[in-house]
Image: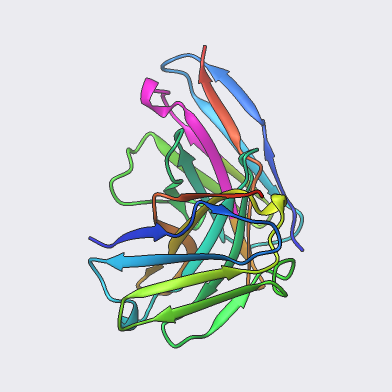
Amino acid sequence: DIQMTQSPSSLSASVGDRVTITCQASQDISNYLHWYQQKPGKAPKLLIYDASNLETGVPSRFSGSGSGTDFTFTISSLQPEDIATYYCQQYDNLMYTFGQGTKLEIK
Amino acid sequence: QVQLQESGPGLVKPSQTLSLTCTVSGGSISSGGHYWSWIRQYPGKGLEWIGYIYYSGSTYYTPSLKSRVTISVDTSKNQFSLKLSSVTAADTAVYYCARDKTVTRGRTYAFDIWGQGTTVTVSS
């Protein structure tokens, strides 16, 4: 099974900061890597699919990049409403696996 | 737009069977093109994909739960269901149903629509 390593597990940043989260797969998953935002008491929300495609309606300050085993999720200018937990998710060989999550807080 | 809604008991006794239903509104399961999944989130916040079903009835389950899981579909009611047998406290979680996103080229294997989730506690 493919293992996903997401880092950091938590992150504190100021409004306006650039924020980066990484996800590493234990083997090549092409671009089958997606990013979600989850706020307390809510279901995860898809932000980025296929590593770099912005889901409809998602603000352009969110972006993703990478291919193969190494992926990056970026918020270009952190806003107060971005406080949430972020998860990566991969698909390979009929299996879907989520990263451990990154809890983002305002400094 | 398409919406999903989970329903079922919030409390299940150990060794019994957990049964949940996901009702799809705003779209038809039988129109095809999408796979429909069950995902759970543990109290510690980890997410685990359980399995999926296609409108035809084709299923695939995560290997670690395969012996205890059954996912079925009722296209006449526009619903799909989850049964998890022989539950223990380790099955306590929020259970979500979700839709696999498709684009022009086909499946993306991302989940673009989720239900609100339902909390299931396994306890005597």
Q: Which residue is nearer to you in this view: B92 or B75?
A: B92
Q: Image point 27% across, 62% down: which residue?
A: B2
The range drawn in magenta is A73-89
Return the residue found at the far top: A107
Q: What residue sits 65% from the left and 64% below the top?
A: B16
As drawn, is B89 to the left or to the right of B73?
Answer: right
Quarter of the figure with residue A95: bottom right
- The reply to whether residue B100 is visible in this rendering is no
> Looking at the image, which residue sits at the far front?
B124
Residue B115 falls left or right of residue B109: left
Of A28 and A81, the residue lying toward us: A81
| In magenta stretch: residue A81 | yes
Q: Is A96 above or below relative to A80?
A: below
Q: Where is residue B27 in the image (x, y as percent from the top left)?
A: 25, 71
Quadrant for the N terminus of chain A in the image: bottom right
Q: In which quarter of the image is residue B34?
A: bottom left
**Towards the viewer: A72 or B28:** B28
Q: Any magenta on residue A23?
A: no
**Which residue occupies the foreground of this view, B99 or A78?**
B99
Q: Residue at x 67, y 31 (%)?
A: A8
